[in-house]
Image (spheres, rainbow, N blue to C red):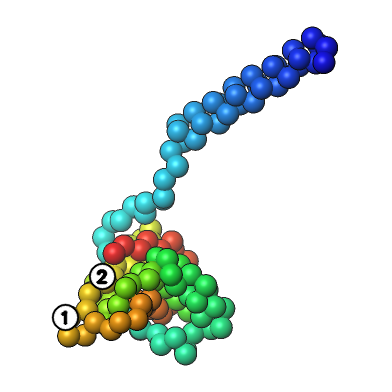
Amino acid sequence: MSSKECGRGVFVRRMAWVLGVCLAVAVFLTGCELIRIEEGERTPVEYAIVKQEELPDEAVEFIEQRKKKEFQMTYLVGDVLYLLKGYGEQMTGGYSIQVEEVSESENGVFCKTRLIGPSEGNQGGEPSYPCIVLKIKKTGKPVQFTG
């Protein structure tokens, strides 16, 4: 290997390092974080809890593929917006999900749920995958899940 080729290799490694540092600084300065919706005054949103057999096939498939991990997503069909929230694999059965809030402000929709553990007499031996699906009217606003 000639000194010219060796020098070129060092230059390429240094440039890659410099570009990596620049990228890291850019990511740090721009802040990689989830978008938080400005809340403002909230008003309740009418919703319905949807049974799995009433869901579109694509939504059922999504739930089945991701049920072992916690997930949250929206699914739009016409003027209906489905809010899906899964709590991942739990070691036993008997869990329930409480809807604490479904509301909207001028900037977004807010969905707050809470996983409630099983009572001592209601624990099953098999793992479970608690999930809830809510149906609301399409708003065109971003949705923020909590809980």
Q: Distance between the residues labelled 1 and 2?
A: 19 Å
First in sequence: mark 1 vs mark 2: 2
Residue 17: x percent and y percent?
A: 60, 24
Residue 59: x percent and y percent?
A: 52, 77
Look at the image and tell me in which quarter the C terminus lies: bottom left
Furthest-bottom residue in view? 53
Classify residue 5 as left or right of residue 126: right
- Residue 19, by quadrant, is top right
Look at the image and tell me in which quarter the N terminus lies: top right
Q: Can residue 128 be seen in this view?
A: yes
Classify residue 106 as left or right of residue 57: left
Q: Which residue is labeled 1 in the image?
A: 120
Residue density around tag 1, few if under 14, some if 14–19, many if 20 or more, within 10 Å: few
Q: Can you say whether 81 is above or below 106 in the image?
A: below
Between 83 and 86, the one lying in front of the other is: 86
Q: Can you say whether 18 is above or below 28 in the image?
A: above
Residue at 35% over, 63% down: 145
Residue 76: x percent and y percent?
A: 52, 74
Callout 2, which amino acid? Arg
Residue at 43% over, 70% down: 68
- Under tag 1, what secondary structure? helix
- Under tag 2, what secondary structure? strand
Between 85 and 134, the one lying in front of the other is: 85
Classify residue 51 as left or right of residue 96: right
Q: Which residue is labeled 2 in the image?
A: 114
User: Mark on residue 104?
Assistant: none
Furthest-top residue in view? 3
Q: Of tags 1 and 2, which is closer to the observer?
A: 1
Residue at 43% over, 38% down: 31
Residue density around tag 2, few if under 14, some if 14–19, many if 20 or more, within 10 Å: some
Callout 1, which amino acid? Glu
